[in-house]
Amino acid sequence: MIHAVIMAGGAGTRFWPESRADFPKQLLTLTGEHSMIQTTVDRVKNIAPAERILVVTGEGLVEKMVNQLPSVPREFIIGEPCRRDTAPCIGLAALLCLEKDPQATMVVMPADHVIEQTDAFCNAVQYAAKLVEAVPGRIATFGIPPSYPAETFGYIERGDRLAADGDNAKGMTAFQVKQFREKPKIEIAERYMQAGTFYWNSGIFVWKAATILDELRRREPKMLAHLETIANQRQSPDFEKIFASEFAAIEGVSIDYAVMEHADEIVVIEATFDWDDVGNWSAVGRLRGSDSHGNTVVGRHLGIDTGDSIIRGQDEHLVVTLGVQGLIVVQTPDATLVADRNNEESIRDLVKMIKDKGWNHFL
């Protein structure tokens, strides 16, 4: 059976000042009518009912996740006591899935992607599940055909095409993975575009729970030993203390470094669904659309000679702009951001400066 694992522990610093430590990006309603985590859970319900959905987040966010996700049993919302990147998160989830289902197939995804074509996404996951069932030890991922030479995404270089799988493929195409590539400089990204054999790495994976644990046992045995101790002590009266000490002892590493760049049998399925990783405020502009002046407005705004800007404020607060172009203006009760739209990657640096000043109440 398919088990959905949703990684929901990110900080979302590029969405400051709305995204805060105690209410980060995945809990925000940036597009549509529901939060990022709610939309992600709704997306997977057709392939994994609530009892097979596992949300892994930060310890301090569990109660907020419980409040936003009433359909997911509380025991399936796991709060990590500290951040240790994606490999420990995934390894622990795999152990918990395997405990419930020795034949578990996992689909692992971040909580903060926008995929509006739910049926196409679910069909793709089911196709990936058939591919990993067919070959022991196989791992599947999804590649997004690039629409521009992005410097902010990792890339997947495809190799040989897999043989067509009849009706199971449903128009989808899968390839052997030749190589994973890091986020490139612009001139390299342009070459990837010209080659036509590269995809953006979606960060969505499908594998058997046993397969990913075998890979971690081979590549990260110390990590897995700590995770197995945590999983085996879940009924202990001292579980919280054990969880905190064992998890803190793990050296954090991403699943890409730990497994994906070394595994032997990986396939990439060309995505037939739309995808946006909603990595910054400009993504909100893309997804919400803009008016005739190129402005995306959420909240109450009055503008004269204002264009190509993202304006986001509280309904009761009026934001007024005059004679400006290409701005990001985000108003919250205690902090307001005014930024050049072409320089929004520096928001991370801004957040670090606030932290360095000790102004943690703004974070």
Image: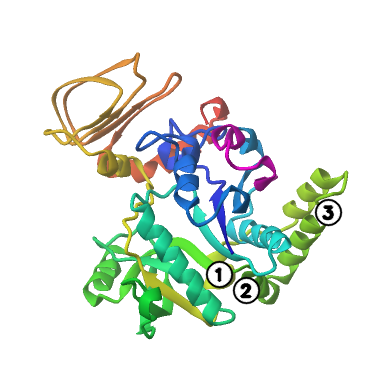
Q: Position of residue 300 (x, y in %)?
A: 28, 19
The answer for how far apart the CA atoms under marks 3 and 2 are is: 23 Å
Amino acid type, mark 1? Trp
Q: Which mark is residue 207?
A: 1
The answer for how far apart the CA atoms under marks 3 and 1 are is: 25 Å
259 shown above or below 359: below
Scheme of colours in the image: rainbow
Question: In front: 161, or 123?
Answer: 123
Is residue 298 a member of the stretch shown in magenta?
Answer: no
Q: Is residue 174 left or right of residue 193?
A: right
Which residue is pictured at 57% across the width and 40% down the height? 71
315 shown above or below 289: above
Amino acid type, mark 2? Thr
Which residue occupies the extreme right position in the image? 237
Which residue is pictured at 25% across the width and 77% down the height? 195
Q: Secondary structure at mark 1?
A: strand
- Residue 182 seen in this snapshot: no
- Cβ–Cβ under 8 Å for marks 2 and 1: yes
Q: Is residue 201 left or right of residue 297?
A: right
Q: Is residue 353 left or right of residue 292?
A: right
Instruction: Identify the residue under disc 3.
Output: 233
Which segment is the magenta one?
A: 64-81
Q: Position of residue 222 (x, y in %)?
A: 75, 67
Amino acid type, mark 3? Gln
- Cβ–Cβ under 8 Å for marks 3 and 2: no
Q: Quadrant of residue 213?
A: bottom right
Q: Which mark is residue 211?
A: 2
Q: Position of residue 251 (x, y in %)?
A: 68, 60
Q: Secondary structure at mark 2?
A: helix
